[in-house]
Image (cartoon, helix red, strand yellow):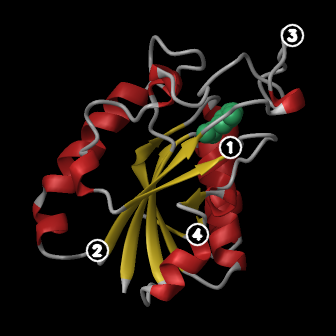
Amino acid sequence: MRALIIVDVQNDFCPGGALGTGRGDEVAAMIGNYQVSELAEQNAYAHVVATQDWHIEPGGHFSDNPDFIDSWPRHCVADTDGARLHGAVKTDRIDAFFRKGEYEAAYSGFEGRAEGVPLADWLRERGVTKFDVVGIATDHCVRATVLDGLQAGFEVRVLTGMCAAVDNARGDAALEEMEDAGAELV
Ligand code: VGL
Ligand code: ZN
């Protein structure tokens, strides 16, 4: 069984947000359409889940002098509008929300939990062995989620047109790294 994982398509990672990526809105709209598209209707996915960067006190992940690689301006603070999924994403078609990063940086969705259950356990309990990934940011959370998923033994595809990078050159390098690690780029 295959799942769709929507990574961190949150307001703060979209234009106007604390850490907006240029293509965030576009990617959010494409994902919303994809959720209702024929592909989704044909039951390509047994489950659709989302991850959310969800910060309370994440230490050095936040900085007043961010380097935009390992430290960042305040973003995706728990229970704020910036942490909510972009309005174009169809939350009624998402089965579970995996939140991560409360007290430390957590780029991988596999560090996330939904009602206490880690993502890998949640997927395995439902017989999911493969998943597709879309979302933000290609060079950070998408990358980390894909690499962790491969490491955990899942078969992974990246739907590259529905991913947005913070930095395009780093995003391209990350895609290459994911492919080298065994992901299929679609
Ligand atoms: C992310 C930067 C900081 C991400 C999270 O979701 O890719 N990027 N925190
Ligand atoms: Zn973060």
In space, the residues marked 1 and 2 are separated at their CA atoms by 24 Å
Given contact means CB atoms under 8 Å apart, are the residues at marks 1 and 3 in contact? no
- Assign a secondary structure to mark 1: helix
Q: Residue furthest bottom?
A: 127
Q: Quadrant of the C terminus?
A: bottom left
- Assign a secondary structure to mark 3: loop
Q: For the residue marked with disc 4, what is the amino acid?
A: Val
Given contact means CB atoms under 8 Å apart, are the residues at marks 4 and 1 in contact? no
Q: For the residue marked with disc 3, what is the amino acid?
A: Asn
The residue carrying pointer 3 sits among few (fewer than 14), some (14 to 19) or many (20 or more) residues within 10 Å by Cα, namely few
Q: Position of residue 41 (x, y in %)?
A: 11, 68
Looking at the rendering, the quadrant in which ligand 1 lies is top right
Q: Quadrant of the N terminus?
A: bottom left
Q: Position of residue 62 (x, y in %)?
A: 80, 23
- N-terminal label among 4 and 3: 3
Q: Which of the numbered marks, if any, corresponds to residue 45?
A: 2
Whether 99 is drawn above or below 120: the answer is above
Q: Position of residue 102 (x, y in %)?
A: 71, 40
- N-terminal label among 1 and 3: 3
Report which residue position mark 4 lands on. 117
Q: Which of the numbered marks, if any, corresponds to residue 91?
A: none
The residue carrying pointer 2 sits among few (fewer than 14), some (14 to 19) or many (20 or more) residues within 10 Å by Cα, namely some
Q: Is residue 171 left or right of residue 135?
A: right
